[in-house]
């Protein structure tokens, strides 16, 4: 396995002009030498493109390429557009959200992990929230992606005080798409077939945004690749889907894409005896959506209906190519589901009627 030298960082931006400067500065400050930065603007219309054009023309440590999409292609589509526009082939792809600010040695530490682990496909560092507790404590955002037998997925240690989190470097089910390094050879290996070069299909464009990292993590596991967590690499993350970016459309995508990812990877045999908890949590989540963001409920169901056939087609392709049995991945990585904390959070959301969603989740009057 060749060593990781050249890296391309891909940033997909949509109406986040207020966060671009900090992200660009952090990327340009990276100590890893051979880095190209590609920023894809998904038709923001908020001044982002003008800011990016000016930044690309200025003197920079790492070259900056700007892609101006005429329409919003979502996260997966934007990533693929960025890979196509990358000025040079790369050994690894660094996905960085606009609301992430990685420390200067972040990328170098992730590259070192891939160099020492030939079968490691992806690695992420410790992401911390960009807000503090009342007494100034650091809040963890993610130390990796966790899968449960309820087919609910979460960022490990999300919302915990950093002082209470002791995580050593090691394997995880998957990495968050907010800030992670992916080996190009692994992306080529797990790419969906049938539509041109791998750069168009490494992520599942049908998902548009959200759960694409879970889908990729699951696929990497089925093809025999590993994912790792490296605590020495640190970054701050605001976490998207908040404020103007948290909308009924975001809620629709979150509800539908979970089911489409399960439809891509699962069968009744792999779910097995977990089906009652899967059914119960799915019913509760759809009920929550109906109560808190009613304008997203029918669109979410329609999105599942439209996408189900394609999800099952991807399932058949994956089963034909997989090197690791589906049940083996579930048995190793899918943790027992703990009802108490999840129900408490679910009830707070139901009672709060989705605070932060445009219009409170209700149709505009």
Image: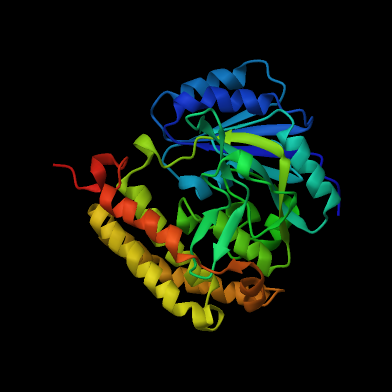
180 sits to left or right of 290: right
Of the pair 179 and 139, the residue shown nearer to us: 139
Residue 92: x and y in percent read 73, 45
> Which residue reaches farthest left?
365
The image quadrant where one finds the C terminus is: top left
Q: Is residue 333 above or below residue 207?
A: below
84 sits to left or right of 276: right
**Residue depicted at x 59% and y 73%:** 317
Residue 305: x and y in percent read 35, 69
Q: Is residue 171 above or below residue 263?
A: above
**Residue depicted at x 49% and y 65%:** 338
Residue 60 occupies which quadrant of the picture?
Answer: top right
Q: In the rendered view, how is the structure colored?
A: rainbow
131 sits to left or right of 128: left
Of the pair 100 and 197, the residue shown nearer to us: 100
Give the total number of marks visible in the rendering. 0
Residue 131: x and y in percent read 50, 31
Q: Is residue 304 above or below residue 27?
A: below
Answer whether residue 173 is visible to the viewer in this image: yes
Q: Is residue 133 above or below residue 60?
A: below
Residue 102: x and y in percent read 64, 32
Answer whether residue 181 is visible to the viewer in this image: no
Of the pair 89 and 48, the residue shown nearer to us: 48
The image quadrant where one finds the N terminus is: bottom right
């Amino acid at each position: 396995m060749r060593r990781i030298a050249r890296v391309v960082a891909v940033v997909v931006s949509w109406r986040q002009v207020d966060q671009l400067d900090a992200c660009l500065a952090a990327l340009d400050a990276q100590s890893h030498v051979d880095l190209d930065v590609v920023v894809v603007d998904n038709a923001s219309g908020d001044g982002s493109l003008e800011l990016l054009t000016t930044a690309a023309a200025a003197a920079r440590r790492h070259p900056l390429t700007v892609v101006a999409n005429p329409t919003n292609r979502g996260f997966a589509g934007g990533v693929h557009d960025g890979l196509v526009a990358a000025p040079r082939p790369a050994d690894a792809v660094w996905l960085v959200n606009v609301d992430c600010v990685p420390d200067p040695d972040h990328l170098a530490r992730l590259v070192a992990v891939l160099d020492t682990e030939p079968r490691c496909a992806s690695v992420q560092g410790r992401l911390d929230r960009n807000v503090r507790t009342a007494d100034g404590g650091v809040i963890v955002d993610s130390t990796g992606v966790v899968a449960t037998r309820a087919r609910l997925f979460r960022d490990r240690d999300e919302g915990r005080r950093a002082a209470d989190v002791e995580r050593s470097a090691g394997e995880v089910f998957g990495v968050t798409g907010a800030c992670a390094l992916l080996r190009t050879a692994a992306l080529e290996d797990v790419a969906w077939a049938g539509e041109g070069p791998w750069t168009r299909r490494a992520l599942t464009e049908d998902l548009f945004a959200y759960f694409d990292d879970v889908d990729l993590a699951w696929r990497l596991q089925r093809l025999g690749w590993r994912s790792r967590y490296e605590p020495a690499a640190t970054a701050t993350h605001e976490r998207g889907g908040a404020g103007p970016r948290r909308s009924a459309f975001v809620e629709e995508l979150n509800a539908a894409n979970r089911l489409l990812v399960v439809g891509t990877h699962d069968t009744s045999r792999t779910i097995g005896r977990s089906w009652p908890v899967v059914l119960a949590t799915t019913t509760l989540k759809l009920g929550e959506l109906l109560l808190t963001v009613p304008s997203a409920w029918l669109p979410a169901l329609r999105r599942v209906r439209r996408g189900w056939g394609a999800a099952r087609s991807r399932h058949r392709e994956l089963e034909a190519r997989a090197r690791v049995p589906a049940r083996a991945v579930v048995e190793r990585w899918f943790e027992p589901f703990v009802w108490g904390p999840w129900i408490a959070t679910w009830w707070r959301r139901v009672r709060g009627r989705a605070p932060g969603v445009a219009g409170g989740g209700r149709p505009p009057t």
